[in-house]
Image (cartoon, rainbow, N blue to C red):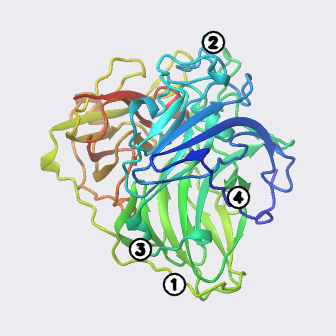
Amino acid sequence: MILSKFVDELPILPVLKPRWKDSCHTYYEVNMTEFKQSLHSELNDTTVWGYEGSYPGPTIEVESGEKVFIKWINNLPAKHLLPVDYTVHGAHLDVPEVRTVVHVHGASVEPESDGYPEAWFTKGFEQVGPYFTKKVYRYDNYMRACTLWYHDHALGITRLNVYAGLAGYFLVRDQQERLLNLPCGQYEIPLIIQDKSFNEDGSLYYPRQPDKPVPELETSVIPEFIGDTILVNGKVWPYLKVEPRKYRFRLLNASNTRFYRIKLDSGQLIYQIGTDGGLMEYPIGVKEIMLAPSERADVIIDFTNLEGKNIIMTNDAPAPFPSGVAPNPNTVGTLMQFRVTLPLSSIDTSVIPSYMGPLPKLREQSASKIRYLTLDDITDQYGREFMLLDGKRWDAPITENPKLGSTEIWHLINLTTDTHPIHVHLIDFQILDRRAFDVERFKKERVIHYTGPSIPPEPFERGLKDTVRANPNQVTRIIMNFDSYTGLYVWHCHILEHEDYEMMRPFVVIR
């Protein structure tokens, strides 16, 4: 079913109002419910899940250092919207079918409020997971201005809950960012990009079985999900009318599996000002930006002197990445359209700053621990391929236990044929480099034999990151300082089908 492009306007995501606010605290309540929403004017309304009655959820905006309390409330039905595989860890028949727990992705937060995958809860908190400790989460937001997002993280069904619609933006603001005079107000627009597929009746399609079905199972987890339709802010191939001036866009890849290599068909530069963890030192003008699932880019697009033009934001990343098929330019190769048709409402005094502030580099010499961690694929008893971190399943004993205040370097040794977006909770890291190595020799001897030079991070990755692309046949090195909280967190692949089927591990920060 092919839907027409650029017939629906881009939805501007609402900003959530707190229930209560004083000089010391801010309190929100956020309900998760099932409802119908129009995702394209040629489709019947689609049943989705969302926060506060909207998919994607409303944007939560906080100030750096503001103490924020959020009660996340599950008001979802007892039956899942999508097919559940009960053979997946954490999703067996001994737990409720619908359960949720919210993770603010990229937040530095106490462990009890991080959304640990086994801290799930059901409707009315009637049943809770073994690690559930509190109904109201606390976010101290000791972070610089940055682009975060919140989404579901329940063990074994994250891929289904996020695909059903449980995702939204969480923006941290600060005074330093305000002083830069970036485009703001109606000229700052968050864009959540996802791929989906639909049934004829407009309902969400998610496969019950992989391409090679597993005859013993009615429903089986799939190795990855690749949709045939692109949505931005919950609309299929929308358009946005803009004025001939500068706009700031926060780009988020909230897809389960799909990567995006984003360009403008006008050939003009995109000015990137920030990465996952906030503003970069200097803006860069780039022709393309690569976003793996959960990565963000903060960009400025300048529509000055383009009156009357239509500009299409395109994607040419293969799916699955990097060895899958190139996207069809007429469908998933297109994200959305900008129409420079609005009159200029006032003179554009916003700027693309030449310098945005210091970003101290972590020195390799400061690392007290170096870890070598493999990304592996193996097969299960049904012959299905599944992925592991460092050869270990989710419930194996914890082996990563960084000390509070210490700096570590992690070597991510990719032995698979996929690029894995590796996300580490709690901290931001910096990418040191990537380097080709002999995979077959490593599998035999367990020794890294490099076959190429050290490749520095791409220009659009040179900032604070919480997710990194670990490419096949490469060792990716990241450096990070565990300087905020102690306790239990997780690190995982952010391809949600991989995360749900064992490619996730706990780690604990110790005193």
Q: Earlier in the sequence, mark 1 or mark 3?
A: 3
Residue 331 disc label: 4
Whichever of callouts 3 and 4 sits on the residue coming sooner in the sequence is: 3
Asked if residue 284 is positioned above or below residue 50 in the image, the reply reads below
Mark 2 Cα shell of 10 Å, populated few (<14), some (14-19), many (≥20) = few
Q: Look at label 2 and name its amino acid.
A: Leu
Disc 4 versus disc 2: nearer the observer: 2
Spatial CA span between label 1 and label 4: 37 Å
| Kind of residue indicated by mark 3 | Leu
Q: For the residues marked 1 and 3, what is the alpha-carbon distance in whole angstroms? A: 11 Å
C-alpha distance separating marks 2 and 3: 53 Å
Percent across and percent down for residue 53 are 73, 43
- Name the residue at 36% across, 78% down: 354
Seen at 46% across and 33% down, the residue is 113
Q: Farthest residue to the left: give it.
A: 365
Tell me residue 360's x, y (percent): 23, 59
Of the two numbered discs 1 and 4 on the same chain, state the one appearing first in sequence. 4
Q: Which residue is mark 3?
A: 180
Front label number (3 vs 4): 3
Are the residues tagged 1 and 3 within 8 Å (C-beta)? no
Q: CA distance from mark 2 to mark 1?
A: 59 Å
> What residue would you read off at disc 2?
93
> Tag 3's secondary structure?
loop
